[in-house]
Amino acid sequence: MKTYIVDTHTLAWYLDDDPRLGAQAEAVLDDPHVRIIVPAIVLVDGILTRDEAIVASGLVPTIW
């Protein structure tokens, strides 16, 4: 079984079905015989990026 480690962009693009993710990378992530490792920092980065986007959108006040 092959093992791959994903970074923040790869995971985000895969989950969003973003066309910037290459066909080969998508095929690897779709393969049920591949082990995918998602480092904890990738999850933290994704959460922080999402939170920054929400604040920047003006949906929540920047001063609490």
Image (cartoon, grey):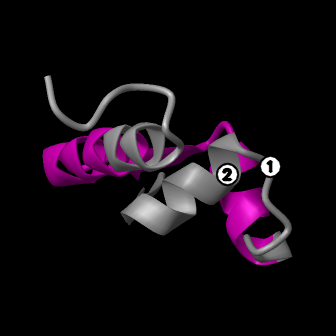
Q: What residue did someone put label 2 on?
A: 14
Residue at (65% x, 41% y) in the render: 15
Number of dots carrying numbers:
2
Residue at x 44% of width, y 48% of height: 36
The residue carrying pointer 2 sits among few (fewer than 14), some (14 to 19) or many (20 or more) residues within 10 Å by Cα, namely some
The x, y position of residue 63, in whole percent, is: 16, 33
| Label 1 residue SS | loop
Amino acid of disc 2: Tyr
- At 41% from the left edge and 42% from the top edge, which residue is drawn? 50
Q: Residue at x 48, y 52 (%)?
A: 1
Q: Are marks 1 and 2 in contact (CB under 8 Å)?
A: yes
Asked whether residue 29 is in view, the answer is yes
Query: Of 11 and 52, which appears nearest the observer?
Result: 52
> Residue 54, relative to residue 60: is it above or below?
below
Q: Which is more toward the observer, 54 or 36?
A: 54
As drawn, is 57 to the left or to the right of 27? left
Left/right placement of residue 45 relative to residue 31 reads: left
Residue 33 falls left or right of residue 59: right
Please, is residue 38 above or below residue 5 in the view? above
In this view, 26 is above or below 52: below
| x, y percent for residue 12 | 55, 52
Provide the residue designation for mark 1.
Answer: 17
Report the magenta stretch's main SS: helix
Q: Which residues are magenta?
A: 24-50
Q: Which mark is residue 42?
A: none
Amino acid type shown at disc 1: Asp
Q: Position of residue 24 (x, y in %)?
A: 77, 74
